[in-house]
Every structure is written in structure tokens, then in C-alpha cells.
Amino acid sequence: MAVAKSPRPTVPLRILTAVPICDGHDSAITTINIELARHGIEVIYLGYHQSVATIARAAVQEDVNVVGLSSYNGGHIVFFKEVVDALRRGGNGDIPVFGGGGGTITPADERVMRRQGTDRIFFAGTPLAEIMELIRRDYARLPRPKGRPQGDRALARALTLAERGDRGPKVRRSGSARSFVVGVAGPGGAGKSTLIDELTSRFLRSFPSGRIAILANDPSHPDSGGAILGDRVSAIYAQDDRVFFRSLATRGSLTGLSAAAPAAIEILRASGEFDLILVESVGVGQESDPFRIFGRGPKLVDATLFVLAPHYGGLIQLQKIALLNGADLVALNKCDHPMAHTARAEIQARLNQNARGQTLHATTAAKHFDPGVDQLFAALARLGALEPAGGEKPCQLRIEA
Ligand code: B12
Ligand SMILES: Nc1nc2c(ncn2[C@@H]2O[C@H](COP(=O)(O)OP(=O)(O)OP(=O)(O)O)[C@@H](O)[C@H]2O)c(=O)[nH]1
Ligand SMILES: [Mg+2]
């Protein structure tokens, strides 16, 4: 089929992609994701083996134009319908769902799926260029919820408007929480997202009724304007209604955060919904100050956590990292690595020289129940004087020596 060429969108289209539960075929969606980003589209990728609830929650919080599922396990007729139904039940049936699955989805299956609410299926043999053109042509418009958006969708839409440059999107105050906002920065791949996820698990266990928000910034590709927003892949514990997770692409901002991040933080604070807000920067360099902690403009966060892994180079590289002077908390992550022992001593010496009482935490975020992460969470909760919104006492953290 010939498709008329559509211009590059001025506001990037956002797609949530995922592979359904009990399906490990992720090579097709990986190819599709990269191609989407090459065509100026922002892809929020959830990963494989994803449940209906996880997909529907992410679609709402990310306020995407469309959900794309890649299904090869044979369960597509039921699974696509359940995603559509979950969106409709939550009043979000305006978010379209499409997908593919090569030869495992037949034209007869598609007819049933369309009747059940799936928008379209891309069959085996469809050229990638044709898929891209159809997506850009048919899904560029932001879905319109019926009536006034509610709950997380309302919050998500306010963030979308902020990303589009709307200066003061209105958000109704729906809670009474006094948010503690923590900026999490560090070099690319140091384990920021994994650590944030482990901190999220501590928060959910310690504060039985509180909510946490995560604003995950990832880089846009300067050539196409597209992006692979991949921080959600590490977010196992974000699969909980008490977690609001939003991915932001930098869209040309060179600060380490999206230009909309300050407004987004204010929107989340103003909602009164969240006791804790964690803001992840993109992987930062030696001179970066994404949260403006050194006085160049109003400070964006209440505290800063700097995360680095043992492979930072040597002593001289440590001396160059500006954020080590200003961060309130420092985590040396990947302490399962043999180099961690030396790194810990070097970083501790660097912090001692600052004489600012900064604490260093040795963490292994890839391990569940890591005592270093327990200690880091306890330090963070102390710093923010975190108290559950309902007034109940936080449950005791299990801290090992
Ligand atoms: C590669 C592959 C694997 C790899 C997966 C690697 C990986 N990480 O993904 C490996 C070897 C590991 C594997 C394992 C298995 N596989 Co396999 N696998 C395939 C194979 C050969 C190709 C699938 C693929 O990636 N195609 C490439 C994509 C790009 O092309 P496409 O499929 O034609 O898709 C087009 C469109 O549909 C569209 N599209 C696809 N998804 C999406 C999503 C969006 C959002 C959009 C816009 C478009 C789109 O893009 C393409 C454009 O032309 C298929 C056979 C086949 N020919 O489909 C079997 C197949 C899917 N596997 C099958 C099976 C049974 C298995 C295993 C259970 C085998 C076993 N007994 O262990 C395991 C299960 C693995 C698991 N954990 O789930 C069966 C499924 C049968 C069924 N559902 O009834 C198939 C059909 C083979 C067969 N004929 O038996 N598999
Ligand atoms: N060995 C080991 N690997 C870890 C640890 N923490 C995270 N990782 C792995 O490191 C890789 C990067 O982790 P992320 O959490 O995505 O890192 P990040 O800092 O958020 O990365 P960017 O957002 O791209 O800058 C992943 O493969 C993680 O599984 C750890 O403590 N030990
Ligand atoms: Mg990350």
C-alpha cells in the first residue's frame, strides 16, 4: 500500500510499546522501537512479559498518543481486548491500541480484534517505512478523553501541556501531602533507575498509604528528535497504583533535564498527591548541575542524590565531578564489582575534603533487599522528615549492619 509521506511532527508523538505477559519475543519490538525513534517519535518501552494492568497504567501516566503491542504467544485476541477494556474501564478508552505479531495474527483474527476495539494490526511483510508513515499520519493527534480527565490522567495531561510549552496548566489539588523532592543524577548507566526502583520498594513498604512520583528524564536523539525512553524498563515496583511514573524526553534541552521539568515538578508538588518525588536526570557529565544546586537560578529540588559506579576513571576524574561538592547523599552503586572497595575509599576521601557532612552509601541496586539501599532510604527519609500522609508510623526498616 502506498502511503502519503507525512511531515516530521513538530511535537513528538509518544508511543508506549510492550510485549504481553508470557511472551519473550522482544526482537520485533526492539526493531520497531529503534525505527520509531529514527522517525522522530518518542517511545516509552515497558519491556516483555507485561501485564494488562501495567500497560494500561503506563499508557495513562505517560499520556501517550497510542499503545503498540507486539504479541507472538498466540493469546492476542484475549490480550488486546483486555488492554482495551482496562483503558475503557478507567475512562481512557480514547487511547488507541494497535500492534503486530508477524504471522501469528491472521486477518481473520484482526477482524475479531477490531470489533473488540483494537485499532489495527500490522501483518508480516509490512515494510517498516509503511508502518512509520501510517503511525505518523494517523496517530499524531493527542487523544481526547471524554469529559474532564480525572486522577492520574488529569495529572498526566497537565504534564503533557507543560511539555508543549503551556506555562500554567491547571491541576486540581487532590491531596494534602507535603512533597519532598529529590534529584537523582549521575553518569549514564550508573544504576540510577534501578536504585530509584529499589527506593520505591522501600517507600511502598514503609509508607502504607503514601504515594511516590518519579520523573524520569532521558535524552532525545538530536538527529531525528525521537527518543527511547527506557527508564520504565527498570521500574519493577512502579507497577503499583501508588506510584506515578512519567518519562520526559529532553527535546533539545542541554541541562540534563527536559525544559518542562521545573513546571512538571511544580505540577506534581501542587497536586498534593505525593510524599516523595524522585527526579532522574539523564546521564550527566563532570560539569553538570541539572537541579541548579549551585545557585544558577532557583533550586529545583529539596535534596540531591548523586549515583556513581566504580568505573569512574581515577582520582582525578573524581575531583572533576562538580556534583560531588553539592550532593546531599552519594551512592556508590554496583558494589558487587571488585573495584568497589577502592572506589569507596577514594570517594569517601573526596567527600571528607568537602567537610559538608555528606553521606556515602555503598549500594548494589541490582540485588533485592540490599542493606546498602536500606540505609540509603533511611537517610533519605530522615533528610526529608518523611511522614505518611495518613499519620501512621512508617513500618520498621530492616537494616543490616
Ligand atoms: C525470532 C523468534 C524467536 C526468538 C525470539 C528472540 C527474541 N528475543 O525476540 C527465539 C528463538 C528465542 C524464540 C523462542 C520461542 N519461540 Co519464537 N519465533 C521467532 C520468529 C522466527 C520470528 C519473530 C520475529 O521476531 N519476527 C520479526 C518481526 C520484525 O517481523 P514480523 O514478525 O513479520 O512482524 C511484522 C509485523 O507484525 C510488525 N510488528 C510486529 N510487532 C509489532 C508491534 C508494533 C507496535 C508494530 C507497530 C508493528 C509490529 O513488524 C513486522 C513488520 O513487517 C517467529 C516465526 C515467525 N516467522 O514469525 C517464531 C514464533 C513466534 N515462535 C514461536 C514459538 C513457539 C517459540 C517458543 C515457545 C519455542 C520453544 N518451544 O521454546 C519460544 C518462546 C520464547 C518466549 N520466551 O516467549 C512460534 C509461536 C507460535 C504461536 N504463537 O502459536 C512462532 C510463530 C514459530 C512457529 N511457527 O512455531 N522465537
Ligand atoms: N552489577 C550490577 N549491575 C547493576 C547494578 N545496578 C544497576 N545495574 C545494571 O546497570 C545497568 C544500567 O542500570 P540503569 O538503572 O538503567 O542505569 P541508569 O543510571 O538509570 O542509566 P541511564 O538512565 O541510561 O543513565 C542495568 O543493566 C542494570 O541492571 C548493581 O548494583 N550491580
Ligand atoms: Mg535511567
Image (cartoon, rainbow, N blue to C red):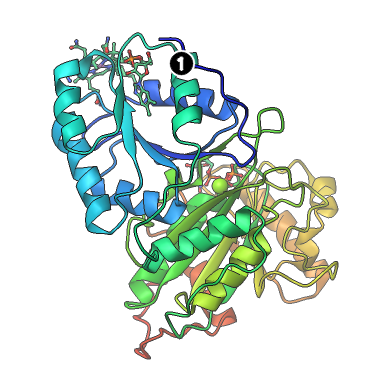
Quadrant in which the N terminus appears:
top left
Give x and y (percent) for residue 137. 49, 28
The residue at the point 50 percent across, 46 percent down is 231
Quadrant in the picture for residue 327: bottom right
List the residue tagged with mark 1: 130
Q: Position of residue 100 (x, y in %)?
A: 31, 23
Q: Is residue 214 left or right of residue 95?
A: right
Whether residue 385 is visible? yes
Where residue 16 sits: x, y (%)?
42, 40
Q: Which residue is drawn at 47% across and 59% down?
A: 156
Residue 108 vs 241, above or below: the answer is: above
- Residue type at mark 1 is Glu
User: Is residue 361 toward the left or the right of residue 244 in the image?
Assistant: right
Which residue is located at x 26 percent, y 27 percent? 71
Q: In this view, does 288 lie above or below 12?
A: below
Residue shown at 48% from the left, 51% from the top: 194
Q: Is residue 49 left or right of residue 289?
A: left
Q: Name the residue nearer the viewer: 142 or 339.
A: 142
Q: How crowded is mark 1: few (under 14 residues within 10 Å), some or many (20 or more)?
A: some
Closest to the observer, 195 or 356: 195
User: Circle 1 — which element?
Assistant: helix
Whether residue 371 is visible to the viewer of this picture, yes or no, is no
Of 271 and 255, which appears nearest the observer?
Answer: 271
Asked if 122 appears above or below 85 in the picture, the reply is above
